């Protein structure tokens, strides 16, 4: 729940920033000189890119949470079997061992979104965020390809 609140607060702050930056872009365009119009358009493009990125990221998080809820309802969420340091951080060798198992599961069942979801979690535990995101995107795509009856 804490992560959802943090995400929502960050999204609201970004939207406020985008509105403020966009208003400055409009002011520059209204000034009317060639230079201020060019700068105004450039300033308007940045909030648009930011809004697009925020929208795509929110879609990803929503879809991943939907998969997590479905997997939890089935009883298939990965069990936290990782050892931790005294400070609470995940032990790297423990995460690597779990990752090897999850990768083998995904290779054995390449069309099962559940295996890819668990692999994404293992990547994240191993601190490989780019691959975790790609594995989760693959899990989402596999789940979307299956209808409700096939899942």
Image: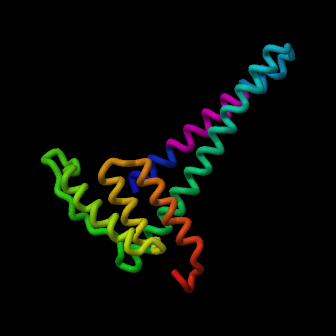
The reply, left or right, for residue 42 in relation to residue 114 is right
Magenta region includes residue 11: yes
Q: Is 23 located above or below residue 67 in the figure?
A: above
Q: Residue at x 72, y 26 (%)?
A: 42
Q: Image quadrant for the N terminus?
A: bottom left
Q: Is residue 107 left or right of residue 140?
A: left
| x, y percent for residue 19 | 67, 34
Residue farthest toward the left in the current orientation of the protein: 86
Residue at 71% over, 32% down: 45
Q: Is 65 colored magenta in this rendering?
A: no
Place residue 95 in its image quadrant.
bottom left
From the viewer's perspective, is 56 left or right of 103? right
Measured from the top left, where is residue 16 in percent x and y? Answer: 61, 36
Q: Is residue 77 left or right of residue 149?
A: left
List the single residue furthest toward the bottom.
Answer: 149
Number of dots carrying numbers: 0
Compare residues 56 and 107 and report the one nearer the observer: 107
Colouring convention used in this rendered image of the protein: rainbow
On the image, the x and y values in percent for residue 5 come to: 45, 50
Characterize the magenta stretch by its predominant secondary structure. helix
Residue 32: where, in percent of width, then height?
A: 86, 17
Which residue does the image show at 65% across and 45% down from the upper left? 52
Q: Considering depth in this image, is 151 or 23 the residue closer to the camera?
A: 151
Q: Which residues are magenta?
A: 10-23
Name above or below for residue 34 compared with residue 56: above
The residue drawn where x is 22% and y is 51% is 90
Q: Quadrant of residue 116?
A: bottom left
Q: Give the vertical position of 102 relative to 6 (above or below).
A: below
């Amino acid at each position: 729940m804490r992560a959802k609140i943090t995400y929502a607060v960050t999204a609201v702050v970004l939207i406020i920033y985008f509105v403020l930056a966009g208003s400055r872009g409009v002011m520059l365009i209204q000034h009317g000189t060639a230079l201020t119009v060019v700068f105004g358009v450039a300033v308007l493009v940045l909030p648009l890119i930011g809004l697009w990125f925020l929208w795509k990221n929110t879609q990803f998080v929503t879809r991943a949470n939907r998969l997590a809820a479905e997997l939890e309802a089935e009883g298939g969420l990965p069990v936290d079997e990782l050892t931790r340091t005294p400070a609470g951080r995940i032990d790297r060798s423990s995460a690597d061992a779990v990752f090897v198992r999850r990768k083998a599961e995904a290779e054995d069942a390449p069309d099962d979104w559940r295996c890819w979801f668990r692999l994404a979690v293992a990547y994240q535990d191993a601190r490989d965020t780019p691959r975790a995101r790609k594995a989760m995107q693959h899990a989402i795509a596999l789940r979307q390809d299956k209808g409700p009856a096939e899942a």
